[in-house]
Amino acid sequence: MDEAYAVKEAQFLGKSVSYVCQNANGPCPLLAIANVLLLRGQLSLQGLVQSPGFVSAHDLMQAVHKRLLDTNPPLLNASELERLTQEKTLKDVVELLPSMLVGLDVNVRFHNITDFEYTVACAAFDMLDIALVHGWLLDQQDNQTMKVVGNKSYNELIERLVDYRGVLMTEEANETAPSVPASSQVETSTEEEAPLDAPKEQDEQEEAKPVSPLQSPLATHTAVLQNLSIDINSAPASSASGAVVSPNSSTSIPSPKKSPSQQTVQTMMKERHISDADAVGAATTLLEEGPILDEFFNSTASQLTYYGLVKLHEGIRERQLCVFFRNNHFSTLFKLEGALYLLVTDAGYLDEPSVVWELLNEIDGDTEYLDAGFRPVTSSEQQENILTQQREQRKQDEQALREARELSLTGKTEGSDVTRDPEHTMPSGGLFGTLANTDEDSLDVDYLLALKFQPDWSCG
């Protein structure tokens, strides 16, 4: 059976418009795109709305598909390369449309509101002349974190965290490894002074040498992902003693260990096939940068920062409609008289005709609802109940993000002894994976994360 979306009527800048409310999949990207086009007057649901006021997912997708074709006609006067490029891109975007009813694979960077790794997903927005924005930005004055993050994307930083956890695993294993008894050391020293048979001396030294708990790159990688437990809500784990407190957060950051152990260096040399000096440098950098990355992700779990909110106000034009990405959800965003508003598409407000917009001026979930004329709405008991539910859902969403990141780093969820196969614990191609496979045993982390976000969600 084809999914359906409820259609709501409202006034927008003096004109009557229709827009689509979310279903069980939440505010999916196709929904946000369709609503931008509907509010612009570039898309019509005439003849598509069925009683009692619903539009099917198929019809909605076909309407967006038609708009894609209308706004991207063949480039008759262009070069062959340009024509082929456009045809290929358009074909890829059209093939992506069905998955946009549920999820979309995007990979953010942290310096600009429009900075995403460019993929077919981004091309879909470009071909419809819709800006895709986010507010998960790093404050330019935070020099320490700026230096570590650089121009890396979310996926690249997660990979760095995985490497950091691997180094910590080796460090901790080395610290807990049994040391050679003093008596054995004395015997070895005494025997070394006497003339010994070389093979016998080598055998005894091999017996005295502690067995490395991580003998191969594969063992190292598996141990990192399967055996290490991360509490994403607490201070990042560290083998170093002492802790320092970030001036921007109450979360403690362990003092980075400046020099790695010899075991860590040897493991990295084998793993990466690099020299001793390069291994020392790489391991030292990970031990210094890892806690900073942990703190960055912990302190920005909502995927919207105050700095990002400021840049959204600066970067979005007056009366511009765009799509806002946050917490793996896509919402319709509008700027009017310097303020930012999110279109309320939560199904819980379907029977509240006065609730149309939500003011985006906070990052902590507090919100204010407005009517079609952008006037504050007096909250009814029903609205208060819905708002309470949405706040709780937002908290659950942020916790789900933490658990998903923990799972991607360690293979374990917090408080659980269940470990996923390492094959499914590494970061996938994006922050929000396309949902295509329904076999849970073969799902990647992004798919599991998407499933967590299928209940109704309010932008905020």
Image (cartoon, grey):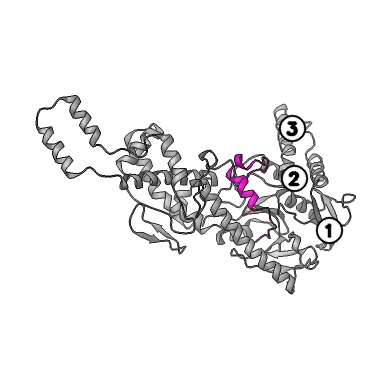
Q: With 404 as the anchor, is 53 left or right in this view?
A: right
Q: Is residue 453 magenta?
A: yes
Q: With 171 as the anchor, is 338 left or right in this view?
A: right
Q: Disc 3 marks which residue? A: 87
Mark 3 in CB contact with mark 1 (< 8 angstroms): no
Magenta segment main secondary structure: loop
* Kind of element beneath mark 1: strand
Q: Nearer the viewer, residue 205 or 236?
A: 205
How far apart marks 1 and 2 lie (CA) works out to: 19 Å
Q: Is residue 315 visible?
A: yes
Mark 1 or mark 2, earlier in chain = 1
- How far across and how far down the image is residue 383, in percent? 73, 70
What segment is highlighted magenta in the picture?
433-460
Q: Is residue 110 visible?
A: no
Q: Nearer the viewer, residue 244 or 124?
A: 244
Q: How many marks?
A: 3
Mark 1 surroundings: few (<14), some (14-19) or many (≥20) residues within 10 A: some
- How far across and how far down the image is residue 158, in percent? 50, 46
Q: Disc 1 marks which residue? A: 17
